[in-house]
Image: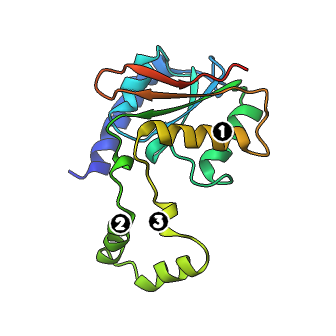
């Protein structure tokens, strides 16, 4: 059975048994917080549980390393929508120890692109258009650095309201322990 068939089978049973009722909420975060975090699978259930968040409490925006790569990219757009349209009054960037973005090798990824059929001319065209693969695929040496990068980008964004605090945390992906990197109550 394929993964899609398996997922659809589980979904059908989930809906038939009305198990969704345990998760009913609306689109506005009850805790009025937006959280930018990593897509790491270890955080999917651990992070909300470790912070005492239930379904509907927060807007979660996930991407590799919790890193904003572009001030006008989709992750930043999601943060702005959470604040301006969905009632978030605080933003928290949460990175984690042992993040794959600390080990990212941009040159190696570009090589994998070619190995998987991406024409090297595409990479060259992107580079000639100003998209630097090294910057686009960049990681960080320490998760604290990645968190601070994103916190600063949010705070300095020309469309982000200065009255909204932007905090930064780093989580242990095994225990769920959180270390505050920056608490932004000015």
> Which residue is at the front of the view, 164 or 26?
164
Secondary structure at numbered mark 2: helix
Whether residue 107 is situated above or below residue 70 in the rendered picture: below
Give the residue at mark 1: 79
| C-alpha distance separating marks 3 and 2 | 10 Å
Q: Which residue is mark 3?
A: 134
> Which residue is under mark 2?
109
**Residue 65's image quarter?**
top left
Q: Residue at x 67, y 46 (%)?
A: 77
Report the coloring of the rendering.
Answer: rainbow
Q: Earlier in the sequence, mark 3 or mark 2?
A: 2
Find the residue positioned furthest to the top.
52
Q: Residues within 10 Å of mark 2 (few under 14, many from 20)?
A: some
Q: Nearer the viewer, residue 43 or 12?
A: 43
Asked if disc 3 and disc 2 are in contact, CB closer than 8 Å, the reply is no
Relative to residue 114, is residue 166 depicted above or below? above
Q: At which x and y percent is residue 118?
A: 39, 78
| Residue 18 visible within the image | no
The kind of secondary structure element at disc 3 is helix
Q: Nearer the viewer, mark 3 or mark 1?
A: 3
Q: Position of residue 108 (x, y in %)?
A: 32, 67
Q: Earlier in the sequence, mark 3 or mark 1?
A: 1
Marks 2 and 1, the one that precedes in the sequence: 1
Residue 4 percent location from the top left of the image: 32, 50
Q: Which mark is residue 94?
A: none
Residue 70 is situated, as x and y percent measured from the top left of the image, at: 62, 55
The answer to whether residue 86 shows anywhere in this view is: yes
Q: Which residue ends up furthest to the bottom in the rendered image? A: 121
Q: Which residue is located at x 27 percent, y 49 percent? A: 3
Distance between mark 3 and mark 1 Cα atoms: 25 Å
């Amino acid at each position: 059975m394929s993964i899609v068939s398996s997922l659809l089978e589980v979904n059908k049973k989930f809906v038939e048994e009305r198990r969704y009722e345990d998760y009913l909420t609306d689109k506005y975060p009850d805790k009025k917080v937006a959280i930018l975090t990593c897509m790491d699978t270890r955080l999917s259930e651990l992070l909300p549980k470790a912070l005492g968040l239930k379904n509907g409490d927060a807007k979660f925006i996930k991407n590799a390393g919790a890193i904003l790569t572009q001030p006008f990219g989709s992750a930043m757009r999601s943060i702005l929508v959470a604040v301006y349209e969905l009632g978030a009054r605080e933003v928290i960037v949460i990175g984690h120890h042992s993040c794959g973005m600390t080990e990212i090798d941009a040159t190696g990824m570009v090589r994998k692109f070619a190995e998987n059929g991406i024409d090297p001319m595409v990479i060259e065209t992107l580079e000639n258009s100003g998209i630097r693969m090294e910057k686009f695929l960049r990681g960080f040496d320490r998760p604290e650095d990645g968190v601070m990068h994103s916190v600063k980008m949010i705070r300095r964004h020309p469309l982000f309201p200065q009255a909204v605090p932007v905090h930064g945390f780093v989580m242990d992906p095994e225990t769920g322990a959180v270390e505050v990197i920056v608490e932004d109550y000015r």
